[in-house]
Image (spheres, grey):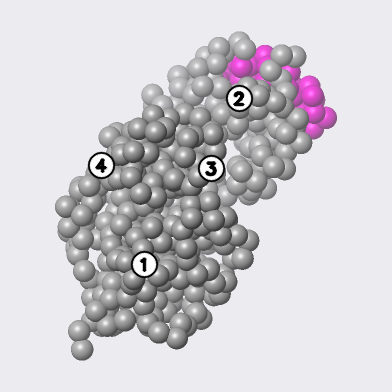
Amino acid sequence: MSGAESRLAAAELLHLTIDKRRTLDEAMTLSDTYNALEGSDRGFARAIASSALRHLGWIDQTVQPFLSRPLSATGIEIRALIRAGAAQVWFLDVAPHAAVNATVDAARLTRGARSGGSFLNAALRRVSEAVPPGETLPAEEIWPAWLRARFVGSLGTDGARALAEAQRAEPALHLTAVQDPAALAALIGGTLLPSGSVEAPAGAVEEFPGFADGQFWVQDQAAALPARLLAAKPGERVLDLCAAPGGKTLQLAATGASVTAVDRSAPRLERLRENLARTGLAAEVIVADGEAFAAEAPFDRILLDAPCSALGTLRRHPEGAWIKTEADVARFPGVQARLLEAAARQLAPGGTLIYCVCSPLAAEGREVVGAALSRGTLVRVPVSAAECPGFEDCVTPEGDVLTLPGPSRNCDAFYIARLAPAPK
């Protein structure tokens, strides 16, 4: 049964993510079948699961006509194996006979799927003969219908389609250098991007030269933009509100500013403390609720990376489209509005505040900022294209930034607005 164990592990990862609403990272820690694998077998199982999650809407829509009953009515093990098999044939260039035979063999390894082997075999043979969904379906149909509608409503059809196309590709790994990004790119054999981030070559980041002595940290190039636009200066008092896991805190600390990092999650702040120690940078780290936090003196600059749906990171976490619900997403704007109001209270006269979220939805970005501006306590400080190398076309007519990935730009989707206290 060569390869059956990898297929079974992939199916278990899919069950844990889609049915149990776990992240893929969590699923990989929970799956005994996956953790029993080694080397390339483990990597292949992860690749199958990741590919299935990236294309799940396509897979489910296309396999349904091949089944004698609704996909949702099949047993959980068989349903996961169908999805794993389809991902191999349509998106991983696995030879159809190998994908079908090994996936059917995987069914024989688990009691819950054993009796459905014939049903699985018939379905996957039809999959192997079918036109791949990428040739017949729009890219945005990889998502559930409710999410597709939200993206189209915020970004238009073309914007949503670009986001979907980006999700279909494996994301690049970006690094932020403590000091000299060009030198870091040369050191690790990476590519210096116009934004100042470094695109890393393939490999384990912990094994790159410079990791152990703290010359860089992992950070998507779009996620690095808010701190750059804040433009903190040495000696200024800077607040990073909702700071964990801390990439932006490290950026701010590297400017020489006096940085206070606040987050309500003590465990996530531990990762920040570890990275501060590794890089040799300094910041005051405080466990507190951002809505209630009040310092004794105001801050010159504040960065608020507010809690959000994280739907701008689906290229790295495609399961988010399926483990989140519309109700989950709807709860964030109220929290974001309260945090923005709390941040504004901490801002010194003449100070600068960056509001950002890793979501392209208007309800979490421009609508939150629009409501804050309407109250008259804050004004927008427009961002210019010259301030956003590599993201010049992402500056909105109002002067905010919405980073969208595309053929020439591998990045997460971030909304960023720069604000200041309204003149009195």
Which of the numbered marks, if any, corresponds to residue 44? 2
* Residue 89, position as x, y percentages in the image: 54, 19
Which of the numbered marks, if any, corresponds to residue 212? 3
Asked where in the image residue 108 lies, by quadrant, the reply is top right
Which of the numbered marks, if any, corresponds to residue 257? 1
Instruction: Tell me the SS state at disc 2.
Output: helix
Instruction: Tell me the SS state at disc 3.
Output: loop
Image check: 186 left or right of 171?
left
Amino acid beneath label 2:
Phe
* Residue 85, position as x, y percentages in the image: 60, 24
Instruction: Report which residue position mark 4 lands on.
Output: 194
Q: Which mark sits nearer the N-terminus, 1 or 4?
A: 4
Disc 1 from disc 3: Cα separation: 24 Å
Q: Residue furthest bottom?
A: 424
Q: Is residue 346 above or below residue 165?
A: below
Residue lying at 36% horizontally and 63% vertically, measured from the top left: 256
Q: Which mark sits nearer the N-terminus, 1 or 3?
A: 3
Q: Examine the residues drawn in magenta and state their main secondary structure.
A: helix
Disc 4 from disc 3: Cα separation: 26 Å
Q: Which mark sits nearer the N-terminus, 4 or 3?
A: 4
* Residue 413, position as x, y percentages in the image: 36, 49
Image check: 40 left or right of 364?
right
